[in-house]
Amino acid sequence: MSAGESSGSVVRRILLGSQLRRLRESRGITREAAGYSIRASESKISRM
């Protein structure tokens, strides 16, 4: 956690990332395809 970041914001970010992953996977979209759609790398998608 960085100096100006509260634990609440970290939890919200983790929950958002989990929800995005569930939505992506429920639609059968790979990390690679998601990255291509938003012009980002597969590794960036996995970090989200």
Image (cartoon, rainbow, N blue to C red):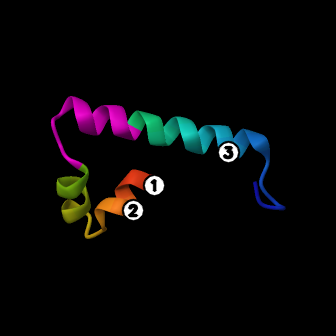
Left or right: residue 44 versus residue 31 is right
Identify whether 39 is placed above or below 30.
below
Identify whether 18 is placed above or below 6.
above
Residue 26, horizontal then vertical, whole percent: 22, 29
* Label 3 to label 2: alpha-carbon separation: 18 Å
Image point (36%, 61%), residue name: 43
Secondary element under disc 1, as helix, strand or loop, is helix
* Residue type beneath disc 3: Val
The circle drawn on residue 44 is 2
Question: Tag 2 or tag 3, which sits nearer the N-term?
Answer: 3
Residue 31, horizontal then vertical, whole percent: 25, 51
Image point (77%, 42%), residue name: 7
* Residue type beneath disc 1: Arg
Q: How many marks?
A: 3
Image point (45%, 36%), residue name: 18
Q: Are marks 1 and 3 in contact (CB under 8 Å)?
A: no
* Label 1 to label 2: alpha-carbon separation: 5 Å
Q: Is residue 32 magenta?
A: no
In the picture of the structure, the residue carrying the numbered disc 1 is 47
Q: From which residue to which does the magenta span run?
A: 20-30
Identify whether 3 is placed above or below 12.
below
Q: Are marks 1 and 2 in contact (CB under 8 Å)?
A: yes
Left or right: residue 7 versus residue 30 is right
Question: Which of the two discs, 1 and 3, sits closer to the camera?
Answer: 1
Image point (26%, 61%), residue name: 35
Secondary element under disc 3, as helix, strand or loop, is helix
Residue 10, horizontal then vertical, whole percent: 67, 45
Q: Residue furthest front?
A: 43
> Which part of the image, by quadrant, shows the N terminus?
bottom right
* Label 1 to label 3: alpha-carbon separation: 14 Å
* Residue type beneath disc 2: Lys
In the picture of the structure, the residue carrying the numbered disc 3 is 10
